[in-house]
Amino acid sequence: MSEPGFAARVRAGDVLIGTFLKTPAFHSVEILSRAGLDFAVADSEHAPVTVTDIDRMVACAGGWPLLVRVARNEPSAIASVLDIGARGVVVPHVRRPEDALAVLDAADFRRGQRGFSPSVRAGGYGTEVPALYRERADAERLVVVQIEDAEAVERIDAIAAIDGIDVLFIGPADLALSIGCAPDDPRLARAIETVAEAGRRHGRTVGIFVGAPEAIAAYRRQGISFFICGSDQSFLLAEARRVKRVAEAVSPE
Ligand code: 3PY
Ligand code: MG
């Protein structure tokens, strides 16, 4: 059911471009999975995407990698979306190494904290040998921790050093707010470079949210490889505005 190698590609630092899914509609998964994007992240932090929505979205995703951003660093929410078959979790506001370790405790069977049921979708509804399912699940799940607080940047070396964290994902909007600066302030650029540098030093994949794909080139030069670009909502809005603009330009008065 799963596309082999997606987790390995993320960890290897392949350049991957995804988007957020903020509309709680599985049809968006069906449509966007045909667009050539590498993955998507259903957003339960900043959109009304429920577990029931995620259940349907994962079912529609087939082999297309669908991750879930949980609303907060909460063990039962993390385990629940992994049971449903999400390919990974994106966890907002990881500020300290302890927060990152708590995500791993919730996401991994081998660490002994994730509750086990063999009959979930992720385990083939009971058709997989339980021990093999647990091993595969631990190997394939992606743990993406969001670095979006000044405190996290201060502690980035300790967070980046933790084995099992797959992506240090920079949230520039919250990070700018936390630093107390505008999006174009050099202090934000310095914080982003600090995270990118820690990723390079520890061999950890670094990702970032971009509103538009034009921003990707500069981040590529810093070794950042995992990009979430816009969302289903921003795509819809941008194209609708473009249609209106072009139609007005070509229509006679
Ligand atoms: C932020 O920019 O704060 C984000 O969380 C983007 O995903
Ligand atoms: Mg954020």
Image (cartoon, rainbow, N blue to C red):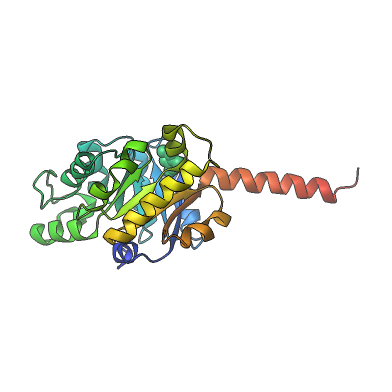
| Residue farthest right in this picture | 253
Is 103 on the left or on the right of 237, as rendered? left
- The residue closer to the viewer here, 9 or 188, is 188
Q: Image quarter for residue 99?
A: top left
Query: Where residue 110 appears, x then y in whole percent?
Result: 10, 53
Is 44 on the left or on the right of 84, as rendered? right
Query: Where residue 15 appears, x then y in whole percent?
Result: 43, 64
Determine if residue 120 is in view: yes
- The residue closer to the viewer here, 148 or 129, is 148
At horizontal 29% and vertical 40% (from top left) the residue drawn is: 94
Query: Would you place residue 116 above or below residue 75 in this image?
Result: below
- The residue closer to the viewer here, 2 or 205, is 205
Q: Quadrant of the image for the N terminus?
A: bottom left
At horizontal 12% and vertical 43% (from top left) the residue drawn is: 115
Q: Quadrant of the image for the C terminus?
A: top right
Is 113 on the left or on the right of 233, as rendered? left
**Total of numbered circles in the picture?**
0
Q: Image quarter for residue 97?
A: top left
At horizontal 49% and vertical 63% (from top left) the residue drawn is: 36
Determine if residue 1 is in view: no
At horizontal 33% and vertical 64% (from top left) the residue drawn is: 6
Query: Would you place residue 52 above or below residue 138 in this image?
Result: above
Query: Where residue 123 appears, x then y in whole percent?
Result: 18, 55
Ligand 1 visible in quadrant = top left
Query: Where residue 198 appears, x then y in whole percent?
Result: 32, 54
